[in-house]
Amino acid sequence: MHNIIFTKETVQQFCTLTSDPNPLHVSRTFASLNGFSDCVVNGALTHSFAVSIIVSDLLHQGNIVILESKSSFKRPIYVDQQVTFTVSCISSHLSDSIQIWRVDFKPAISSSQSAQHHVALHSHILTIRLSHEK
């Protein structure tokens, strides 16, 4: 497990780079008026982060093609909220040339909090093809 905080600056830069005009990501007032306690991190940002983690880990092994990507957003991740993420290869086939990877983002919790807080906020599953040719 690793910790990460998606800062206000990171979210703002991502919104600018992707031309995302949704005020839910950058306006506390708008977020509050729509039932959220703070600005919400873009699902596309956590997905991009997940892809970059997996690709950077595998790039030295050869060429990578993302065959499929599935994401679920069960609860919001808020700007400046500390979360943990885990990365795991959950399946591999054809001599490891086809791999399925999962990245889960969960709230960072203290040991005194109950297990119900361990629900993944965002999950991303990527099926990749790895070619060992460079």
Image (tube, rainbow, N blue to C red):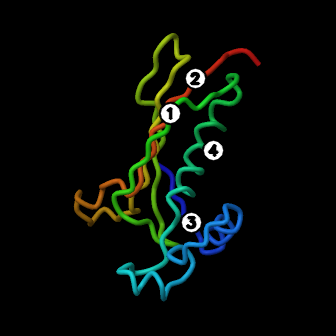
State which tag comes first along the sequence, 2 or 4.
4
Above or below: residue 62 compared with residue 9: above
Please report the residue visible at 45 percent of the width from the left and 81 percent of the height from the top.
Answer: 31
In the image, which is nearer the foreground, mark 1 or mark 2?
Answer: 1
Query: Residue 44: x percent and y percent?
Result: 55, 56
Query: Residue 104: x percent and y percent?
Result: 42, 48
Mark 4 and mark 1: Cα distance apart in space: 15 Å
Mark 4 and mark 3: Cα distance apart in space: 15 Å
> Mark 2 belongs to which amino acid?
Arg
Above or below: residue 108 compared with residue 122: below
Q: Decide: marks 4, 3 in contact (CB < 8 A)?
A: no
State which tag comes first along the sequence, 4 or 1.
4
> Mark 4 belongs to which amino acid?
Ser
**Along the line of sight, which residue is nearer the eye, 20 or 26?**
20
In the image, which is nearer the foreground, mark 3 or mark 1?
Answer: 1
- Give the image quarter of residue 107: bottom left
State which tag comes first along the sequence, 3 or 2.
3
State which tag comes first along the sequence, 3 or 1.
3
The residue identified by callout 1 is 68
Query: Residue 65: x percent and y percent?
Result: 62, 28
Quadrant, the C terminus = top right
Q: On the picture, is 125 further left or further right than 9?
A: left
The residue identified by callout 4 is 52
The residue identified by callout 3 is 6
Q: Decide: marks 1, 2 in contact (CB < 8 A)?
A: no
The residue identified by callout 2 is 129
